[in-house]
Image: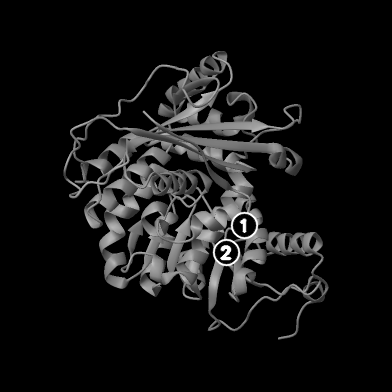
Amino acid sequence: MPKKESEKIFSVQKSFNMSEKFDIILFGVTGLVGRYALRHLYKLATAKGRNLSWAVAARDETKMRNVVDDLRRRTGDSNIKITMILADMEDAKSIEEMVKRARVLVNASGPLRRHGETVIQACLKHRTHHVDISAEPNFIEKVELEYNEEARKRDVYIVGSCGVDSITYDMGLFYLEKKLGGTLNSVEAYLRYGSDNTSLPGPDFNCSTWKSIIDIMTHKEELKQIRSGRNDKLPDLEPKLKAKYLPFKPEVDEGWAIPLMSADLSVMRRTQQYLYREKKKRPIQIQTYMMLTEIWHFVFLLLLSSLALLTKLSLGRNLLLKYPYFFSGGVFGEEEPTEEKLESGWFRLTIHGKGWKEKLLNYEDQFSYKPNTELVVTVTGRNHAYGSTGLCLVLAGIMLLTEPENIPKRGGVFTPGGAFGETSLAEQLNENGIKIELIKRADI
């Protein structure tokens, strides 16, 4: 079939060979995370001697062409030839046609609670590995509960929450534990966001993230039901790490810390459950917090959290979805954040760990004395929600292809830490702009 003139101009190929298989298909390439992920995939697919074949997928061909054209302009590569595949999560047949052409599906689409299972089911059917960026506890934990056994039987790796948050939490914790060399008892993690230019106009996040938050608040009871089906309680450990519910000033960062209500804490704890169950390893106690520069920021967040009341009513949900900029105080908006604003943003995750220099002979033993060592590790990067998330997602997919000897020996549903804890992921994050560093070690 002859190419259209536009295909010649943009050097884009739409594949008509439906048997052609790719190492990676990037699904959701027209979204904001997907566009950043494409830039990283273009670079990383051939880095370090790799020669990975890849394609892109989305539901809108015109938007895909525009995205590829943008990549051509940015890279100056006029010879870019990328196979485009049309796929829509609401069309199960199109999802199957896409999935069976990939070894790994790198899923940048979302939210996933409503239609994400269609993709998971197709991946299991065609033995295609899957990584995504879901931050929706309902979807993440339901997939583990309902599909883990089938994934194990079919030797398929399903790794959720491969965005920057969960990956940096798990990789930062593993880095700290490695530097300790003994036994880590507990960590408190403090996440801070900032910008080099706070005067830039426009929202910080787009509507997709806002819709996901509304969906999570609306379906809290569903999450309780999902968790009632789990049987993975961790043992009681001493000394016990207590959660702090009121604002406080931590030792390791300036400002005020408040509890961080996100999926990342549950993801990290599920990593510890996996290591305890499968690796016979003493679990690490974890608490996560968000850093605020001023105490009045806490009052603003309290007001935002009160919006959960509106999600209980259909009218309230519709108002929240219709006017995100107003109800979020300008944090979320229908228009996308500008690239200048995204690139001016930065994040710093500070992980404060306490433990012992010594190792236990048996993972179920307890120390008879208090922890004697503390360490502080920081994880830093830029463009947190989109650029860094796209990087983490692409590297997660690449790990499944290039380091099979360092991932679990058998498929299943995994957290990032469960899947990639023994790979070079932390080192490759460092090489690509997300820095993990030890900044303190001291006796206590």
Total numbered labels: 2
Q: Which mark is residue 282?
A: none
Q: What residue type is labelled 1?
A: Ala
Residue pointed to by mark 1: 37
Q: Are marks 1 and 2 in contact (CB under 8 Å)?
A: yes
Q: Please provide percent x and percent y for residue 387.
A: 63, 49
Viewer-proximal residue, 109 or 104? 104
Viewer-proximal residue, 51 or 330? 51
| Quadrant including the N terminus | bottom right
Q: Please provide percent x and percent y for residue 343.
A: 71, 42
Q: Which residue is drawn at 67% across and 37% down?
A: 345
Q: What residue type is labelled 2?
A: Leu
Q: Is mark 2 on a helix, strand or loop?
A: strand
Q: Which mark is residue 26?
A: 2
Question: How is the model colour-coded?
Answer: one colour
Please say whether residue 59 is visible from this viewpoint: yes
Distance from disc 1 to disc 2, alpha carbons, whole Å, reads 8 Å
Is residue 247 shown left or right of residue 320?
left
